Image: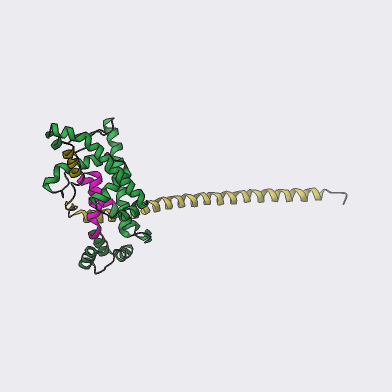
Chain colours: A yellow, B green
Amino acid sequence: MSIDKDQWKFEVINSYKGAKRAKPSEDLFAKIEQQIYTSKHRRSIISLHQQKWISIAASFLLILNACAIGLCVKNSMVNRAEVDQTVKNLSIISDYNLYE
Amino acid sequence: MRHYIAITKRNHGLNNPNEILKLVVQGDQKAFRALYEIFSAKVYNVALSYTKNVEDAEEITQDVFTKIYKNAASFKGNSALSTWIYRITINSSLNLIKKRNRFSFVKTGLASTEPPTFDHPGILLENKENARILFQVIDTLSENQKTVFILSYIEELPRQEIADIMALSLKAVESLLQRAKGNLRKKLEDVYPNRRKSKSKWSKGYRLKN
């Protein structure tokens, strides 16, 4: 009985001996090529998507810059008006400076 | 090596798989086909031994060759090309098994207990029943023992090549193999009395105690 059992175990452990290699299906290589092609193609789609977002971000930045420049120009015009007023005031003061 | 030469001459006229890989890096589709013809059976059979499922084995083979194509440039030649490819295959197979086990736990709420029966397409008819038991018992081994057993008994690789693939010493591989065989024999002890009682259980598949 013990010899039978050991023999049986030996046969089970070696049951793969003499087996032929299994082969994958004929169309597997085509599927692999398709998978590679799809992943390459997906990359180009993503970059187009990214390009869209980049252009939106760039436009946004341009608008922001334009607003900033506009504000700067406005501020500088206000400052000039103040400077002109100050200069005018000074001349008024100096006109009335009796003790020079 | 003669096998490689016969296939490569038929496909591309090159003698060396490493040379073929260099052409794959340059995007040569014929070279990639040649590489596939050399290694697809090895990759598929290793995957089949792990997964015991034809669809899963094909999925793994697809993933492995996709990885080879994408990462061909990163292969430095520090090991044999076959060693690199075997490693990718083993890692992909083990990852898929872990993924399947996770999902089966979520589905059923219990760890997967009933191993499916598997009829390897290449097994001789007289060995089919024993092979069915063998593949069930292999599943109960730890990852390293399973890998060593599959590479040694199923792929029939030399021990040194197994050591290179698993990045272990030769002694470690031999020790793992001894433990794997010992554990398989212990598991088969549980199977043997039940096999004598009822043969019909074996045709359906019998759940082994882990």
Q: Is residue B126 left or right of residue B10?
A: left
Image position, residue A58 (x, y; %): 46, 52
Residue A35 painted magenta: no
Image position, residue A11 (x, y; %): 17, 44
Is any part of residue A61 visible from this angle? Answer: yes
Position of the N terminus of chain B, as image quadrant, is bottom left
Is any part of residue B60 visible from this angle? Answer: no
Image position, residue B160 (x, y; %): 32, 55
Q: Which residue is drawn at 71% across and 48% down?
A: A85
A53, B36: nearer the viewer: B36
Position of the C terminus of chain B, as image quadrant, is top left
B46, A99: nearer the viewer: B46
Q: Check the image and report above or below for B48 versus B16.
A: above
Name the residue furthest top: B109
Give the magenta part as a residue range: B37-63
Q: Which residue is drawn at 15% across and 34% down?
A: B195
Residue B44 painted magenta: yes
User: Is most of the magenta stretch helix, strand or loop?
Assistant: helix
Q: Check the image and report above or below for B10 versus A73.
A: below
Callout count: 0
Image position, residue B164 (x, y; %): 35, 55
Q: In which quarter of the image is residue B50?
A: top left
Q: Check the image and report above or below for B194 versus B17.
A: above
Name the residue furthest right: A99
Q: In this view, does A71 lie to the left or right of B171?
A: right
B195, B30: nearer the viewer: B195
